Amino acid sequence: MSLRYALLGLLADEAGSGYELTKKFERSLDRYAWHAKHNQVYQELNRLAADGLAEVVEEGARGRKTYAITETGRADLRQWLLNPPRNPVVRNEFVLRLFLLFALDPKEARAVLTEYAAATQRDLDALTALVESADVDPADGALPDPLAFGHLAAGFGLHMLPASRDWAHWAIAQIDNRIREEKGEGEDRTRGA
Amino acid sequence: MSLRYALLGLLADEAGSGYELTKKFERSLDRYAWHAKHNQVYQELNRLAADGLAEVVEEGARGRKTYAITETGRADLRQWLLNPPRNPVVRNEFVLRLFLLFALDPKEARAVLTEYAAATQRDLDALTALVESADVDPADGALPDPLAFGHLAAGFGLHMLPASRDWAHWAIAQIDNRIREEKGEGEDRTRGA
DNA sequence: CTTAGACATGTAGAAACTGACACGTGCCCT
DNA sequence: AGGGCACGTGTCAGTTTCTACATGTCTAAG
């Protein structure tokens, strides 16, 4: 059901066509929150309209249909937001990979972690730049789309990415300790518990 | 395909039955990395065996089947770990909810965030207790391997949970600022935008 | 001896999601 | 006038995941 509420959320901000909503998805939700393809967006919009949570408010050129959220849809979205599940379902291939790293040789795991730390730092730099550029021209009227409804979300990234990067550095240090221990054991066989 | 590799990863650590793997899932991967139900686990184990990536090494009481990873399976897992995708698919209902909080009134959003901060703190306390209890009895026999699966995962939680909690506090402060601003701006305007 | 609860493994139908394919339009550039 | 490209909406077959149902065993407590 999450896709449904993701779309209602975007529509709560602003009416739009499937095409526009797909683009918005790619720019904002896709990276950290929820991934969806254009065909899924179109299908869900049709369902949303069938269920009375959204409606077509305009039909334009090239078969374009602009959807807007209805009052029912707004109420539904509100209920969903106010009742978070105690244990939300998580599926994050990225984190899964991190957890399974122990299956690699320490050296290989170290290389993967190093690349991960670097990628996280790159993401952090990009987000920092984005936030700063948004701060620079607040008088301009329209905030850049990714931040238009994402001030809190951007803050989330600014808190979580450094933690993620720091964890990677910590994990690398763990691996280095282990490599050192293994070397030490090779020379001097005493086992200290 | 992620479920497949999650199981291979668990099997790379230690052979086990579907039942045991399900429990392991719940204790380790489920919370931060990957969610799966027991029926999915059983189905995937059958497929894994059919594809030669795992094999039944023991059949015990109550129809119990113990699976072990094969060399092919190990090689497959290794390849998967060494070739991470550039843009992994993310679907996180929790983050999605954060992104969409703007659709609530500030007061409502504040309440959701407050509960979230408290829940995160509870998780952190529980994890801290768990880690300390594990550290306390090293004489007990098995020291946690620095690379073993739970060790990296626990470290991840210890890094990410405080960041998550701090973000929530920051977000609450943002909302309070906003509420204060709105009060200051117009006494006569009672309707939110 | 009975029963409750952990152990243990599955099937079936529905929903969500993926990847590939399909089709047509308005606009700009040359 | 024609080509290329962004715009714009969809179908379909196949895979993955979810919800609910189904079945039976071993063990410890009363």
Image (cartoon, coloured by chain):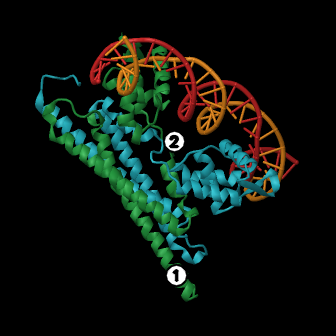
Chain colours: A green, B cyan, C red, D orange
> Which comes sooner in the sequence, label 1 or label 2?
2
Image quadrant where residue B178 sits: top left
The numbered mark 2 sits on a residue in which chain? A
Q: Nearer the viewer, residue B192 or A140?
A: A140
- Residue at (60, 51) in percent of width and height: B5
Of badges 1 and 2, the one in the foreground is 1
- Residue at (17, 29) in percent of width and height: A141
- The percent position of residue B12, horizontal first and vertical second, equals 64, 61
- Residue highlighted by disc 1: A183
Work out whether residue A78 can be spotted.
no
Q: What is the three-letter code of the residue carrying label 2?
A: Val
- The percent position of residue A151, horizontal first and vertical second, equals 27, 39
Q: What is the three-letter code of the residue carrying label 1?
A: Lys
Q: Secondary structure at mark 2?
A: loop
Image quadrant where residue A170 sits: bottom left
- Residue highlighted by disc 2: A89
Q: Secondary structure at mark 1?
A: helix
Judge from the rendering whether residue B163 lies leftward or rightward of residue B94; answer left or right.
Answer: left
Q: Quadrant of the C terminus of chain B?
A: top left
Mark 1 residue crowding within 10 angstroms, few (<14) / some (14–19) / many (20+)? few
- The percent position of residue D21, horizontal first and vertical second, equals 73, 31
